Image (cartoon, grey):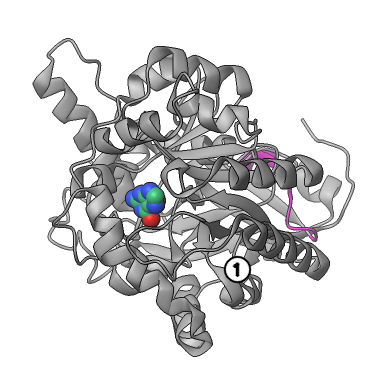
Amino acid sequence: SCAERSAPVARVFRGTFMHSSGSAPLHILEDALLGVNEQGKISFVGAAHEVDCLSKTWGFSSSQIKELGPQEFFMPGLIDTHIHASQYSYTGTALDMPLLQWLNTYTFPTEANYKDLNFSKDVYTKVVVSWCEKFCFLASRLHNFCSLFFFSDKFGQRALVGKVCMDVNKAVKHYKETPEQSKKETNRFVHELLRRNYPLVMPIVTPRFAVSCSPQLLSHLGDIAKNNNLHIQSHISENKEEVNLVKELFPSCQSYTEVYRKHNLLTDKTVMAHGCHLTDSELKLFRDAGAAISHCPNSNISLCSGMLDVRRVLKSKVKLGLGTDVAGGYSPSMLDAIRRALDTSKALKIKDPQHETLSFEEVFRLATLGGSQALCLEKKTGSFEVGKDFDALLINPLVQDGPFDVFPDDIVGTVIKAEHALHPFDSAGDDRNIREVYISGKRVVPFQKSL
Ligand code: GUN
Ligand code: FE
């Protein structure tokens, strides 16, 4: 049926759309029409045979309709719920140590270099540019953060950007702040970003993790988040040595989760990376608070941190998205995160035949709608629902010279259609298959070419 016309449509697409909902991990809308209004929001989703009625209601002509190719489809943008912009410079190297040693040896000395403004500008431009195919979530530090959110906005990227805070660092003693400095810098960061009024870039309060933060600093950050109703991100229960250390450092807290909860850092706008070793009672604290977990399977395997049982988290009704966790994870690609999430689920099955593996479609949902829920953005992004922003990837799984040109012609077009197109793309596709990227209705591709 025809909806009533409100804002004028700016774009209309006709073709296949794949997305998720709470009731099904994969919906395939074949031969659909989708309209995007001038504010970048989805104004209608209908069937192509309703074209006459839709064009009358929404006031577009048939020449305005952009038709997708026969193999092409739209999917919601991939949402990276945890990535370190300031670790981009050493992505894919130095994964030979467990977490705490890795942080002390590689991460802290590298991040300390970001006080050099030219260095930070250079890396942050590359970060935003090379991660253009998704809407991500970045962490930065100190004086250089302006360039990160400036570039995010300039390239039309949707991002939650945080300034990493830590006042305890025994390994690299000059790379830390006092609790007062950290509070002041976070306030400066938050207010500068809010003052700029970027449409898609928002601040997120970022204590590094309980090991690196005094109770005083955690309290300051909890207050800032509460007073400004802000998002919060950190790390939790990534590796067992870390969990034991937190027990020693916070003897009065019942659990790692309780450390954050006690300092007002566990809210419905909180996303905690990893959570591999959370107990049932901690998952319940997450659920009660409405807090989310960012599952970073590449990093969890690369640093031998642990294997998150996503099935258990979902059964506990805790919100969950996927993250790349560069540089703990060696790949900035969300397609890699999808594959590693499936691998982890299958490894758990090998260990325990009773384990119920995640389906392909479920992991697709985690990478899209799951991410938007984890970031408390499900009213804005994550699926093709009327009223949401049009954040989408146009996929052609069979692009020339792409990863699938080995497929003989008779398989192409028979086996690979509808949902079958999604599987090879998710399993072995890459940037070559991502033909166009839209964020909030704007086409944001080819950044590389424009530089
Ligand atoms: N825990 C605290 N800081 C970090 C970090 O930078 N990366 C990872 N993977 N875990 C952390
Ligand atoms: Fe991380």
Q: Is residue 18 visible?
A: no
Quadrant in the picture for residue 219? top right
**Is 130 left, or right, of 100 in this rendering?**
right
Vertical side of 113 occupied by 330: above or below? above
Q: Which residue is mark 1?
A: 443
Q: Residue at x 19, y 64 (%)?
A: 94
* Residue 46 lies in the magenta stretch: yes
Q: Position of residue 19 (x, y in %)?
A: 50, 38
> 448 or 66: nearer the eye?
448
**Is 105 left, or right, of 447 in this rendering?**
left
> 408 or 26: nearer the eye?
26
Q: Position of residue 319 (x, y in %)?
A: 52, 28
Q: Read off the magenta span.
A: 38-51
Q: How many marks?
A: 1
Q: Amino acid at mark 1?
A: Arg
Q: Position of residue 230 (x, y in %)?
A: 71, 45
Quadrant in the picture for residue 145? bottom right
